[in-house]
Amino acid sequence: MKFQDMPYKRVDFAEIQNRFQDLMKEFQNAQSGEEQFEIHKKYYSLTDDVETFSTLAEIRHDGDTADAYYKEENDYYDASMPGYKDMVIKYQKMLFESPYRDYLEEKIGHVAFKSMELANKGFDEKIIGLMQEENALTTKYSNLLASAQIEWDGEVLNLSLMTPYLQSADQEIRNRAYQKYIAYFESIGEELDQIYDQLVKNRTAQARALGYKNYVELGYYRMNRNSYGQEEVEKFRRQVKEDFVPFVKRVHERRKKRLGLEKLTHKEEGVYFPQGNPKPVGTPEEILKCGQRMYAELSEETKEFMDFMIENELFDVLGRKTKRGGGYMTYLPNYQAPFVFANFNGTSGDVDVITHECGHAFQGYLAGMDPIKEHRDITMETAEIHSMSMEFFTDPWMESFFGERYQDFLKMQLEDAIIFIPYGTMVDEFQHIVYENPDMTPKERHAVWRKLENEYRPYLSYEDSFFDEGRIWQKQQHIYRSPFYYIDYVLAQTCAFQYKIWMDEDYKGAWSSYLKLCRLSASDFYGNMLKEVGLKVPFEDGSMKMIAEKLEEKLSKIV
């Protein structure tokens, strides 16, 4: 069914509660594991209904944040979903404590039961009010950024539509764009501080209400970190500082030389070539058609997936003035349909949507065929491998997107992925410090960020900029909306680098491994799955040093 034809109705959570009560009573009265599993399939149907309608509301609200109807629907789910989560947790607790657990675990997997345990640790009905408040604050933040109206040469643009000018090859245009861009963040800076301060205090209150010292432990439970913890992440961050940051510094030296600059400032952060970054050669419609051809040639599985996406119009990628910024893939279970949301703006990021977000969507499409719903509940450090690796697997088709500048794109793609590692790791350390010290003032948080900038990105200058005060993190939506998510991108990028190194030597073998990882979904724990498909676990000693050496060798040949 085409997305525009998918009917929407508001979920009646009173009715859902009655259905849950009936389901739990039936489950409790079951006389065997087989009978309980058949009842569990009714749970799949119930939760699929809720997730489908709430996701439809979210997508349509994000597509036009000024739409009054879907704004009201979005507010309704912000207030209602914590109560719904309470119903899910109570049902899962019965499943967890079932006398027939051995049979159920055999059917839905041991990972699912570990995830239930962590979900139970991360929730209690006594914090529903705080969770509702948290949802409202994150929506307020997203809407604040989406409502930007920046005057530019007779037009009014939002933050996303300013991107081409921020990356312009013309330094004068770039300077003017940044002045406008920074001026908007200055105008809302105090409000951004207030929202984040409220979020930190709210999340800390949730953690303490559940008996935790601070939000860090609770945040890990909510991220479903079911096979590693803070110790492993800290070990990984040390590797990045010691083994990867020096490598990235050398990458930036190459960029400076190529751009003819004495130093890199924030204004050049997104610029890779003196003539400007490569841009897609086609219209948005042509980019989508080109993507369809690419996936048809890549494999039978990707052809089937992309044909389904195009036929059912499961993309909303055109930038609009009142559209939420950023991009994501989500899933509509009743239609077994992934959905890709993005903001095309005429930059190479438009093609990233067809690779990165479609990597997520492809895995979601495959996972949707698995009758065991719990296998779809992948942890984020695994989910991001699917997307970041697809960016590299599609490299052989980039000429059709970028024409004669496709080699420039491949250089930029690899450099950009390398440069991301310190930034993404810094975001994670910043959040740990913030939530371990929840009483810091906004000014103190900015100072923490600035200090981390010197450790992770000493090669970058924010001279005479609002962001020099340590405020650039406020444009990173994950920090507000999804605490502790960002390190998942970094861990996944290290695995994508492994696939890049592998595919350059044996493309077929690397693709076979990737396809297997997509199909494994959440059927095993993170480290086990990586080893099963032939990848190294990023936490292992020497992993970042090995990757840095391999990538530096690769860059020396193409830059």
Image (spheres, grey):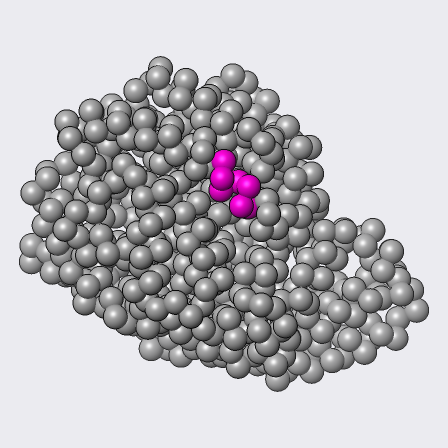
Picture residue at 61% right of the left edge, 56% below the top: 224
Residue 252 in view here:
yes
Give left or right: position of 11 versus 249. Answer: right
Q: Does the magenta stretch include residue 104?
A: no
The C terminus, quarter of image: top left
Picture residue at 59% right of the left edge, 76% below the top: 209
Picture residue at 66% right of the left edge, 81% below the top: 17
- Using the image, determine if residue 284 lies above or below residue 127: above
Q: Position of residue 153 (x, y in %)?
A: 7, 54
312 or 181, which lies in front?
181
Give left or right: position of 376 versus 246. Answer: right
Q: Is residue 235 magenta?
A: yes
- The stretch in magenta equals 233-239
Q: Position of residue 99 (x, y in %)?
A: 89, 65
Give left or right: position of 442 versus 546. Answer: left
> What's the magenta bit mostly, secondary-structure-wise?
helix
Q: Where is residue 251 in the image (x, y as percent from the top left)?
A: 32, 28
